[in-house]
Image (cartoon, grey):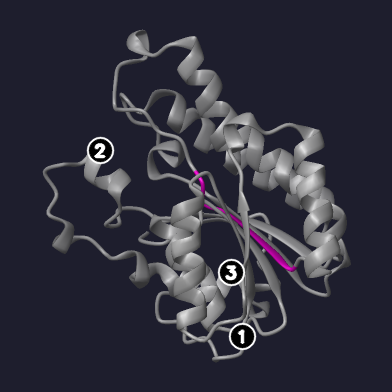
Amino acid sequence: MKDYSPRPDLLAGRVILVTGASSGLGRAASLAFARHGATVALLARDEARLEAVYDEILAAGGPEPAMFPYDLAAADDRSLEALAGTIAQHLKRLDGLLHSAHQFYSLTPLELQTLEQWQTLMRVNLIAPFALTRACLPLLKQAPDASVMFTGETHGHQPSAYWGGYAVAKSGLETLTRIWAAELGADENLRINTLIPGQVATTLRARTHPGLAPGTLPSVDDLMPWYLYLMGEDSRTLRGQIIECQS
């Protein structure tokens, strides 16, 4: 899939919600989806950074996006259902959902990690993605071809010391993916998969691996063929899969 060449109108007419859209892989994916014709609903905590991505999409000639400043750490069913209702009212449809938002503290032994940290890690990295997907499910099921993408993590897929609650939450996304795919079945127009980006030049990777020179890692743009493939119709038979970009 790294050599996948999407056609320019791959996502034309589609509406795609991206969490964590203000930076890193979420920002890169939002720009890539818009370049290929999608109307992108941008969701993140920082409104100013969301506005910057909004402006970038317009400057590049993409469809006018929508902005949703929203803190997933404070998510509840009512506000998520209101969010889904707003998308339905103003954008009329939802064809894709990329979960790229994440919460990370630091690499520390389990004995130094707190209950409060774990509650936030689980809430942002696992519980909110579940709850947001559930709230958006009626809209997604109405689409002729819809894709939900969770963002996994190498150390959740293959557990390592010091990754603690972050890895546990990310590993939970893999189980969630498989359960939901099994419940949806092969006849649904909706598919759910988890993509594990691996080592890529992001601010998170700089924090966890400060000794790695950014120039030695793939850039966020290098991974966009994977994101476009999984979001577009060419991957419609791929269901309940855990996919490593750099395996």
Q: Position of residue 11 (x, y in %)?
A: 64, 81
Q: From this viewpoint, is residue 244 visible? A: no
Q: Magenta stretch: residue 97 in it? A: yes
SS label for mark 3: helix
The quarter of the image holding the C terminus is bottom left
Q: Earlier in the sequence, mark 2 or mark 1?
A: 1
The mark found on residue 230 in the picture is: 3
Q: In the rendered image, which residue does mark 1 sit on? A: 10
The mark found on residue 208 in the picture is: 2
Q: From this viewpoint, is residue 33 visible? A: yes
Q: In the shown orientation, is residue 108 left or right of residue 3?
A: left
Q: Nearer the viewer, mark 2 or mark 3?
A: 2
Q: Nearer the viewer, residue 151 or 86?
A: 86
Q: How dense is the environment of label 3, judged by Cα within 10 Å: few (below 14), some, or many (20 and up)? A: many
Q: Magenta stretch: residue 195 in it? A: no
Q: Earlier in the sequence, mark 1 or mark 3?
A: 1
Name the residue: 25% across, 38% down: 208
Instruction: Look at label 3 and name its amino acid.
Output: Leu
Instruction: Look at label 1 and name its amino acid.
Output: Leu
Q: How dense is the environment of label 1, judged by Cα within 10 Å: few (below 14), some, or many (20 and up)? A: some
Instruction: Look at label 2 and name its amino acid.
Output: Thr
Rounded to the nearest whole Å, what is the CA distance between mark 2 and mark 1? 35 Å
Name the residue: 66% across, 47% down: 177
Q: Nearer the viewer, mark 1 or mark 3?
A: 1
Residue 160, by quadrant, is top left
Q: In the shown orientation, is residue 96 left or right of residue 110?
A: right
Rounded to the nearest whole Å, what is the CA distance between mark 1 and mark 3? 11 Å
Question: What residue span does the magenta drawing correspond to?
Answer: 95-101
Q: Is residue 200 above or below residue 130?
A: below
Q: Nearer the viewer, residue 169 or 158?
A: 169
SS label for mark 1: loop
